[in-house]
Image (cartoon, rainbow, N blue to C red):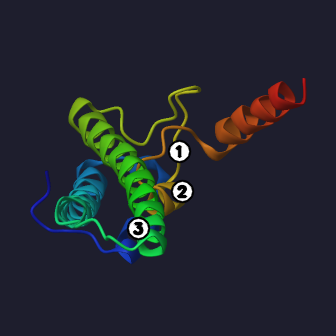
Amino acid sequence: MSETALTTEQLLAQPEADYMNEGQLAFFQKLLLEQRADLQARIDAEFKALRDYEPNTDIADSGSAEEQRQWQLRLLEREKKLLDKIDQALDRIADGSYGWCAETGEPIGLKRLLLRPTATLSIEAKEREEEMEKHLREA
């Protein structure tokens, strides 16, 4: 990967023909690794808080504490899913498929990847997927 890191502005200023070049892949790899490290630190802190939990003898406080624990567990589950998505995106960078729509093979687009670096579908493909899900729910 490239020695000089691109800024967001430099990334967006590159011509379409340079899509997912070495510099762009390095940019997204760095972004994903930073997000992964931040997320892992949050997960570790949440696990520590759950391990350090001491039950309260007051029934009202105990109910609140249990509700808080359930909320923390749901949050951890969501964060673990995001961690998996980040790892999958890093795998796609390694195998050369990052940035390309899994459904159509078309570019996902730099702006979309900046907003959601774990995206696997182009905006159009994602809209079709959501429309299909909507129809299935209504059926």
Residue 115 spot, x, y in % from top left: 50, 63
Check disc 3 and report the residue beneath it. 62
Residue 95 spot, x, y in % from top left: 24, 29
Contact between marks 1 and 2 (CB within 8 A): the answer is: yes
Q: Quadrant of residue 11?
A: bottom left
The correct choice, above or below, for 131 with respect to 83 in the image is above
Q: CA distance from mark 1 to mark 2?
A: 7 Å
Q: Residue furthest left?
A: 3
Amino acid type, residue under disc 1 in the picture: Ile
Question: Label 1: few (<14), some or many (≥20) within 10 Å?
Answer: many
Amino acid type, residue under disc 3 in the picture: Ser
The residue shown at (55%, 34%) is 106
Q: Secondary structure at mark 2?
A: helix
Front of the two marks 3 and 2: 3
Question: Residue 112: which disc?
Answer: 2
Check disc 1 and report the residue beneath it. 108
Amino acid type, residue under disc 2 in the picture: Arg
Q: Quadrant of residue 81?
A: top left
In-image side of 44 versus 93 (left or right): left
The residue shown at (25%, 35%) is 91
Q: Secondary structure at mark 1?
A: loop
Question: Label 3: few (<14), some or many (≥20) within 10 Å?
Answer: some
Question: Residue 64: which disc?
Answer: none
Q: Earlier in the sequence, mark 3 or mark 1?
A: 3
Residue 79 spot, x, y in % from top left: 37, 53
Q: Earlier in the sequence, mark 3 or mark 2?
A: 3
Front of the two marks 3 and 1: 3
Contact between marks 3 and 1 (CB within 8 A): the answer is: no
Residue 129 spot, x, y in % from top left: 70, 33
Q: CA distance from mark 3 to mark 2?
A: 44 Å
